[in-house]
Image: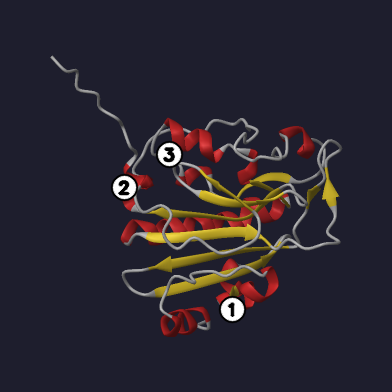
Amino acid sequence: MKKLILFFIPFICIGQLKFLPKSKGEYVEHTYYSLSYLEDHEQAEWVHYKLNSEMLNGNKVRKKYYIVDKKVSTGSANHSDYTNSGYDRGHLVPAADMKMDSISVIEASYMSNISPQNRNFNGQEWRKLEEHVRFLAKKNEIYVTTGGVLRYGLDSIGTKNKVSVPNLFYKIIYNAKMEKMTAYLMPNKKLESFKNYKVTVDLIEKLTGIDFYHQLEDEMEERLESML
C-alpha cells in the first residue's frame, strides 16, 4: 500500500510574490514576506508582504530574540551591531503582523527585517502607523511595502557590520480590491502625527530608485502612484 504523504503549505505563500518591487538588491524570499537586501547598508531596502484578517487572527506570541538571516548570501547584520547604539531594532515587517504560526514568528525576528530606528519614532508614530495598517487589513486584504531610504553618507552603527541609519522610512499600502494606494514618508525621529506624512508613491520612487507596482497597467500605475 502506498503511503500518503501530506505537505503543509502555509496559505499565505500562494500569491505572496505578487506586486514585488523592482530594485538592485539581493532578493530573498521567506514564507510570509520577501525582501531586497543591500549589503552596503546591512539591511533591506524593502520588505513586501500580504496582510489580511486571517493572518491577524493568529495567536502566536512574539519571541524577543533576533536571528541572523542565513538566506542572505553575504550575511545579514547581527543583533550585537545594535547593542548600546542608542537605536531600537526596528521591525520593517511588524512582529504583530506575523503571529499566524511559529514560522511567521521566527521570520519576523530575522535581522534582515530590522533597521535602526529612533526609540521615540519606533515606539510612537511609527507604531501607530503599523496599527493603522492592521486596522485596514482587517477590513480588506492589502499589500504592504516598507523600508528605509538608503543612500550613501548615512551615519552607521555596529563594529562587526556597518549598519546604516536611515533618516527617512516609508510605507506603501495597496488595496487591490478597491484600487487604492496610500504612502507615508516619515523622518526617523519623534513626530507629531503619522497622518501628516502622506506622500505620493512617485516621491518615494524618486528618493529610493525602486520601481513599485510596475506589474499594474501603466495608466493605473500612473494614477495610483501620483495620488496623495
Q: Position of residue 103 (x, y in %)?
A: 45, 33
The residue type indicated by label 2 comes to Glu
Q: Position of residue 140 (x, y in %)?
A: 32, 62
**Among numbered discs 2 and 1, the one appearing first in the sequence:** 2
Vertical arrangement, residue 197 with respect to residue 144, above or below: below
The residue tagged with tag 1: helix, strand or loop?
helix
Q: Which mark is residue 54?
A: 2
Q: Residue at x 52, y 42 (%)?
A: 95
The chosen color scheme is secondary structure
Can you identify the residue that label 3 sits on?
99
Q: Residue at x 43, y 60 (%)?
A: 143
The residue type indicated by label 3 comes to Lys
The residue tagged with tag 3: helix, strand or loop?
loop
Classify mark 1: residues with Cα within 10 Å, few (<14), some (14-19) or many (20+): some
Q: Which mark is residue 117?
A: none
Asked if labels 1 and 2 touch by Cβ distance under 8 angstroms, the answer is no
Asked whether residue 125 appears in the rendered view, the answer is no
Classify mark 3: residues with Cα within 10 Å, few (<14), some (14-19) or many (20+): many
Q: Name the foreground residue: 138 vs 176.
A: 176
* Image side of residue 158 versus residue 209, left or right: right
Q: Name the foreground residue: 199 vs 6.
A: 6
How many angstroms separate mark 1 from mark 3 (CA)? Answer: 32 Å
How many angstroms separate mark 2 from mark 3 (CA)? Answer: 10 Å
Asked if labels 3 and 2 touch by Cβ distance under 8 angstroms, the answer is no
Vertical arrangement, residue 110 with respect to residue 192, above or below: above
Vertical arrangement, residue 45 with respect to residue 60, above or below: below
Which one is in front in this view, the residue at disc 2 or the one at disc 1?
A: 1
Q: Residue at x 65, y 55 (%)?
A: 25
Which one is in front in this view, the residue at disc 1 or the one at disc 3?
A: 1
**Among numbered discs 1 and 3, the one appearing first in the sequence:** 3
Quarter of the view holding residue 190: bottom right
